Amino acid sequence: MVEAGKSYFHRGGTEPLLGQTIPEHFAGIVARYPEQEAVVSVAQGRRLTYRELDEAVRLLAKGLLGAGFKKGERIGVWSTDNLEWLLLQMATAYVGIILVNINPAYRQRELAYALQCSVVQGLFVIPSFRDSDYLSMLTSLLPELKTGSGLSNLNNRQLPFLRTVVVFEPENPIQTDRPAPGFAIWNDVIKAGNIVSEQELSEVIASLDCDEAINIQYTSGTTGFPKAVVLTHHNILNNAYFSAKAMHFTERDRLCVPVPFYHCFGMVLANLLCLSVGACIVIPAEHFEPEAVLQAIDHEKCTAVHGVPTMFIAELEHCNFSCYDMSSLRTGIMAGAPCPPSLMLRVIEDMHCREILIGYGETEASPLTHLTSQDDSLERRTETVGKNLPHQEVKVVDLQTGAKVSLGEVGEICFRGYHLMEGYYGNEKGTRDAIDDHGWLHSGDLGIMDADGYVKITGRIKEMIIRGGENIYPREIEEFLFAHPKIRQVAVFGVPDAYYGEHVAAWIQLHPGENLTEKDIITYCEGQLTHFKIPVYIRFVDSFPMTVTGKLQKFRMREQEVERLNKKPE
């Protein structure tokens, strides 16, 4: 329903919201499609039917209980995409443990923050990823791992609540050795479940409520470190289910998932979306590799593929693209950054993905709020983010008064409905700042709404930088750089990039008499900041554009930096 002349739209639905927990709903899917393929992990060479997936999840769920984890506690997962990640996602949901998603690109400092912020009691981790030696970082952060004993308490003073660290090797699921005495391994957890009966597990599942928290995801903010978004069964199960319905997904569909599981895109709109309707999850690789995606689509006859625009570009422009058969594709979601019309046409025509949809939302909204439709015109599929999903409200408001603006006028996009987060963990003020007294989540994004409820994003109020689908918060980088003894002041902001959407730029003012080079700054950041947070453009300045009240004007810096870059010779 659109309010006459005003930017407000509400969608009911022909189907009511699900009032179940994740394990309750999943039990129905398993009963309906027991021998249907549920997941294929290409890199691991492993396949599970829905019956086999349920058995593996129940085994792990009993292991978590046997290892001493209780409903309401938090377990972090620091890993790339693999079958074990999915098993943890479901097993924690079975027993009411809150899964905390940790970015595989995090360094030790960022990991420590994530563990502290969410008060994590257990951590599941792979040995390494690319140049990140997770085990080395963990033993540096937790020296007790060198002398501990598996599942016992670590007793670390910095992280006193963290009891257990479990290391697992996706390529070696029957791993028997441990890198240090204090690490537990996957088999330790499974064996711990021997003392837990099926009846005990069933009783725990029955005790769960759909409004209870089940997941914490970190989202970028404009001040300080990321906030810990608390999501419930009701939030993410309904968001996944109604997204699947919007895509016309059924048990006959097979979704290629190159997006990371630690994002809502991967965990909710891929994994849970498939499991909510009986479709198959196809994991092409542990992290994004364009040719692995093409191979998986071809060999597994995938009907859908997700991704951010840069992923689709990398796939289309891969030198071996023509060697793979894309004819099985039908649909998918492209989100995380604006999609140029030319790219949409290439995905439709060259990848045969005729029903590819554009999605929009944010982690605080579980995450999807808007999605285009297969029946929309090409113009609407490229210039808007579609309409909100069923059972959601959206409005566009004036930045000063908070009143709904007229149709076609720019304002802040706000959401209300079942999909709103429970709040930021341990951060009541942040929650109050995000969700107003009337229950509206303020997105910080600017946009306009038309008479049919379609929304077009026009910009962002907040300073968040989006690079290749990764949200980057300038304040964290600024605080890190400001700690350098030679730096007096720093401002970090995004500048446009044709491929990644944006790159990180930093203007730096040094203390009088000090000298630094761009290389010095990059070296200082390496090993301390995730690679995509390290500034690409660094400029040393004597002063900053400021308001009369002394506030930095980053939009002026952005304008000047873009002008400077445009003047550079090719």
Image (cartoon, rainbow, N blue to C red):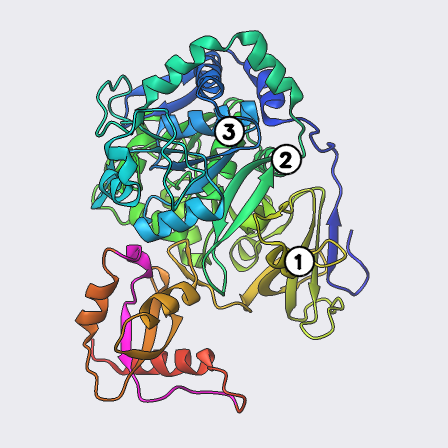
Q: What residue appears at the point 48 percent right and 68 percent down from the top-left corner?
A: 463
Magenta stretch contains residue 116: no
Characterize the local packing of mark 3: few (<14), some (14-19) or many (20 or more) Cα atoms within 10 angstroms.
many
Label 3 sits on what residue type? Cys
Q: Which residue is mark 2?
A: 238
In the displayed orientation, state which residue is furthest to the bottom. Answer: 548
SS at badge 3:
helix
Highlighted range, magenta: 528-547
Q: Nearer the viewer, mark 1 or mark 3?
A: 1
Q: Nearer the viewer, mark 2 or mark 3?
A: 2
Check the image and report above or below for 97 versus 259. above
Magenta stretch contains residue 538: yes
Q: Which residue is mark 1?
A: 432
User: How many dots with numbers?
Assistant: 3
Characterize the local packing of mark 1: few (<14), some (14-19) or many (20 or more) Cα atoms within 10 angstroms.
some
Q: Which residue is mark 3?
A: 274
| C-beta proximity under 8 Å, tags 1 and 2 | no
Q: What residue appears at the point 76 percent right and 42 percent down from the top-left corner?
A: 12
Label 1 sits on what residue type? Arg
Label 2 sits on what residue type? Asn
